[in-house]
Amino acid sequence: MYLPRLKELREKAEKGQKEIADLLKISQQQYSLYETGAREIKLCYLITLSKYYRVSIDYMLGLTDKK
């Protein structure tokens, strides 16, 4: 599952991959794979990121433009 807005949200929040990886308690390398779509992200991480960025999961998935 590719999250087209994951990198955009991180950059808009002025955070590095390492900071977000630390939030999720994973390695920066693993987070990078989620951001590029090379690895499927776990639902629990999606929920955490949705709350962190204050956007819906649908927005993160690119299914809606409504945050």
Image: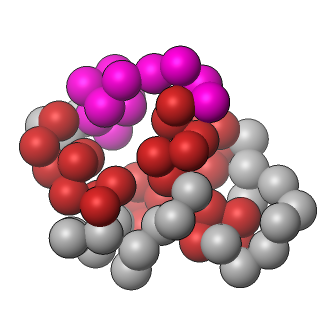
The picture places residue 45, in percent across and down from the top left corner, at 41, 54
**Is any part of residue 48 visible from this angle?**
no
The image quadrant of residue 52 is: top right
Q: Is residue 36 left or right of residue 28?
A: right
**Location of residue 44 with respect to 16 vertically, above or below:** below
Question: Residue at point 41% right, 74% down?
Answer: 2
The picture places residue 47, in percent across and down from the top left corner, at 54, 56
**Is any part of residue 61 visible from this angle?**
yes
**Location of residue 47 with respect to 61 vertically, above or below:** above
Magenta region includes residue 44: no
Q: Nearer the viewer, residue 44 or 5?
A: 5
Q: Is residue 24 left or right of residue 44?
A: left
Magenta region includes residue 16: yes
**Location of residue 15 with respect to 7 vertically, above or below:** above
Question: Residue at point 30% right, 69% down?
Answer: 37
The magenta-colored residue range is: 12-24
Quadrant (top left/top right/bottom left/bottom right) for the N terminus: bottom left
Q: Is residue 59 left or right of residue 44?
A: right
Question: Residue at point 45% right, 21% down?
Answer: 15
